[in-house]
C-alpha cells in the first residue's frame, strides 16, 4: 500500500500519507515507479521523508520547489524536519 507521495519528478523528499514507525517499510509513488524505503525513525502523518541521500547544503525539493537546504547529511528514509533543514525564507532575525 502506498505510504508517501512525490508530486514533482525533481522532488527529493516525499510527503507521508500516514504516520510511520521506525523500521517500517515505506512505499513512495514517483514518476519513475515505486521506491521502497525503511523509516529511520517514527515520522508523523503529513511530514517529509528523504527519498535520496541529501548532502550538507543540498537543496530540499518538495512539490518541485526548494524549501530549504540540508543542515546535516540526510539518508533515505530519514525524517526531514527542522532538526536537519535550514531555511532562510521568512527569517526575521
Image: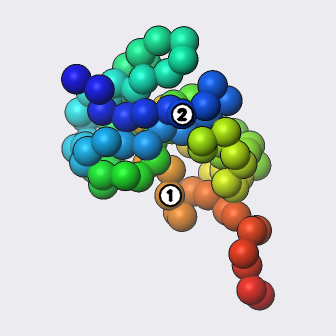
Q: Is residue 19 left or right of residue 35?
A: left
Q: Which residue is mark 1?
A: 81
As drawn, the label of residue 7 is 2
Residue visible at 43% across and 33% down in the picture: 5
The residue located at (42%, 23%) in the rendering is 29
- Is the residue marked by circle 2 packed among few (<14), some (14-19), or many (20+) residues within 10 Å? some
x and y percentages locating residue 71 in the rendered image: 66, 56
**Residue at image coords 54%, 33%:** 7
Residue furthest out toward the top: 33
Label 2, label 1: how far apart the Cα atoms are = 18 Å
Quarter of image, res 53 = top right
Q: Is residue 73 visible?
A: no
Above or below 92: residue 5: above
Q: Position of residue 39 (x, y in %)?
A: 33, 37
Q: Secondary structure at mark 2?
A: loop
Q: Nearer the viewer, mark 2 or mark 1?
A: 2
Q: Is residue 56 above or below residue 28?
A: below
Q: Position of residue 11 (x, y in %)?
A: 61, 34
Taking 83 as reference, is 43 left or right? left
First in sequence, mark 2 or 1: give its number: 2
Locate the C terminus and report the quarter of the image it occupies.
bottom right
Asked if the residue at tag 1 contacts the one at tag 2, i.e. Cβ–Cβ closer than 8 Å, the answer is no
> Which image quarter is the N terminus in?
top left
| Residue at position x 50%, y 32% in the image | 6
55 to the left or right of 23: right
Q: Is residue 28 left or right of residue 44?
A: right
Residue 65 picture location, percent across and down: 70, 46
Q: Can residue 44 be seen in this snapshot?
A: yes
At numbered mark 1, what does the secondary structure look like: helix, strand or loop?
A: loop
The residue positioned farthest toward the bottom in the image shown:
93
Amino acid at each position: 500500500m502506498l505510504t508517501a507521495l512525490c508530486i514533482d519528478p525533481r522532488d527529493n523528499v516525499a510527503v507521508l500519507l500516514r504516520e510511520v514507525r521506525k523500521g517500517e517499510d515505506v512505499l513512495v509513488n514517483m514518476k519513475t515507479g515505486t521506491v521502497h524505503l525503511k523509516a529511520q525513525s517514527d515520522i508523523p502523518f503529513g511530514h517529509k521523508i528523504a527519498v535520496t541521500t541529501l548532502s550538507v547544503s543540498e537543496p530540499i525539493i518538495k512539490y518541485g520547489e526548494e524549501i530549504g537546504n540540508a543542515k546535516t547529511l540526510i539518508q533515505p528514509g530519514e525524517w526531514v524536519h527542522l532538526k536537519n533543514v535550514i531555511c532562510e525564507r521568512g527569517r526575521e532575525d
